[in-house]
Image (spheres, helix red, strand yellow):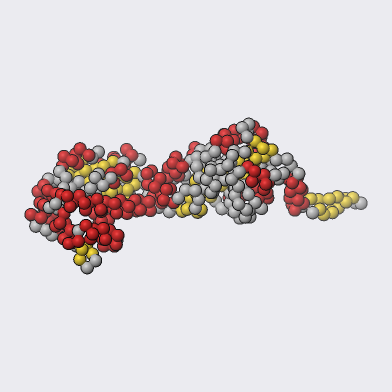
Amino acid sequence: MKQAFPLGEGVTGLAVTDEGRCATARLKRRNMKTEIFTNDLTGAAEILKNGGLVAVPTETVYGLAANGLDADAVEKIYEVKGRPSYKPLSLMVHGAEEMERYCLSVPPQAKTLAARFWPGPLTIVLKAREEVPPVVLAGGDTVGLRCPDHPLTLRLLELTGLPFAAPSANPSGEESPKTADKVMAYFDGKIEGVIDGGACGIGRESTLISMAETPYRILRRGALGEEEIADALVDGMTIIGITGPSGSGKTTALEALRELGALTLDCDAIYHELLANDRELTAALGARFPAALRDGKIDRKALAALVFSDSGALEELNAITHRFIKAEVQRRLRAWAMAGGALAALDAIELISSGLDEHCDAVVGVLASRASRLERIMRRDGISAERAAERIDAQKGDDYFKEKCDHILYNNGDVNQFSDLCKKSFSEVVKSHG
C-alpha cells in the first residue's frame, strides 16, 4: 500500500511501505517469463548470480534454488513458496571440500558420511559460519549441507561457485515435484528458470542428520535409512580386534584400550548376556543341545561339557552363537558411532572365524604360555586342571594366531608390565590408523 507524507510547504509525495514493495515484487514475478534450460546452463548461472530463482533437478525431487549467500534472493524463495519464515533452509554445495567454508567445527565423522553418500540424498547439519545469512538459518545457528546427485545441478554449482539455498520446488503443503513439468505447473511465470533434467529417480527428500553436537540425530527420515548411515560411521571408526586363546590376558588388553577412550566390547560377556536375555538364541541352542536346556534357560556349564570334548558340536555351537553375537556387536557399534565415538575394540576368541575381524583396522593376538593359561582359567572359572586343559586343547593353537593376526603381544609376566606394554602398543596402532 502507499501513504501520503508532506515533502514541504504545499507539496505532497508518496512513500512505499514494505508491504507495498512486496506487492510490487509479487506483481513483477507473476509477469515474468520462466525460461527452460537443458544442456546450456550459462543463462541459469547468470540468473542465480543476479539474485533470481531457478528450479534444479536432484536425485530425490526438484529444488527451488537461489544464491544462498544473498539474503534478498533467499527471501524470494520464502515468498514464492509461501514458506513459513521460521523454517530454515539447507545449502546445496559442490562437495565436501566446501564444509569448512560455511560451517564451524566440522567433525571427521561428517566427512566420513560425505565421502560415503555425496553426491546423494543426505543433508548434514552443522554449526554455521557468519557468512551464511540469518534468513537461511531462520533464527538458528546451524545449517544443513547437501551435495545433489545430478550432473546438471553439480555443473551449475561449479559454474556459479555459489552454494544454493534450495528447498523442494513446490508451494508449501503441496507434493514435491519429480519433473520439470510439475515445477512449471506450480511456478510458471513466478520464477526465472527451470533446468529440465528429466524425472527424479528417488522421489523422496534427503535424510537430514544433525552433527552439530553429539549424539548425532536424524531430524528427517528420507531416502537413506538410519542404520545405513550408522553403518557408514562404524566403517569410519578405528576398530581394533583383540583375540587369542582363553587365559592369555585379553581382558587386560581390552582395559588398556578403554583407557584410550575406546568402546570395548567383550564378545564372551555379550554372549553371556544374550544367553540370559535373548529368547531366540535360547530356542536355537535348546533345539540343538536339549540336554543343556533347563527350566527354559541354557545351563552354561552343561553346554560347555557337551561341546569342549566334541569339535563337531563346538563348530555347531559357534555357527549358532556367532550370528547373534555379530548382530549385537553391530548394534552397539552403531550406537557408539551415532554418539560420536571414533575408537572401538572387540575382544573375541573366535574373532577371525566369526568374521568379526572384517570390522577391524588391526587385529592383535594376545598369547601366553600353557602353564600361565591353565592357572588363570582354573582361578577365573573355578574348574579343575583337567577341565581347564580340555578347554585349552579344544581351542586353536598359537601358530594360528601368529599367522592370522597383524600384531602379537606376549603376556607371560607381571600384569602391570603387560598393561603398560598394551597401552604403548595400542597407542601406536591407533596413531597409525587415525
Q: Is residue 424 left or right of residue 118?
A: left
- x and y percentages locating residue 154 in the rendered image: 55, 36
Dividing the picture into quadrants, the one containing residue 54 is top right
Q: Is residue 309 left or right of residue 262?
A: left
| The N terminus sits in image quarter | bottom right
At 65% from the left and 47% from the top, the residue drawn is 77
At 54% from the left and 49% from the top, the residue drawn is 205
Q: Nearer the viewer, residue 289 or 378?
A: 289
Residue 95 shows in the view:
yes
Question: With respect to residue 392, does 42 lie above or below?
Answer: above
Q: Is residue 199 left or right of residue 425?
A: right
- x and y percentages locating residue 418 in the rendered image: 19, 46
Q: Nearer the viewer, residue 172 or 175?
A: 175
| The C terminus sits in image quarter | top left
- x and y percentages locating residue 143 in the rendered image: 54, 48
Question: With respect to residue 308, does 298 lie above or below?
Answer: below
Question: With respect to residue 415, does 283 lie above or below?
Answer: below
Q: Nearer the viewer, residue 34 or 214?
A: 34
Residue 423 shows in the view:
no
At 49% from the left and 48% from the top, the residue drawn is 223
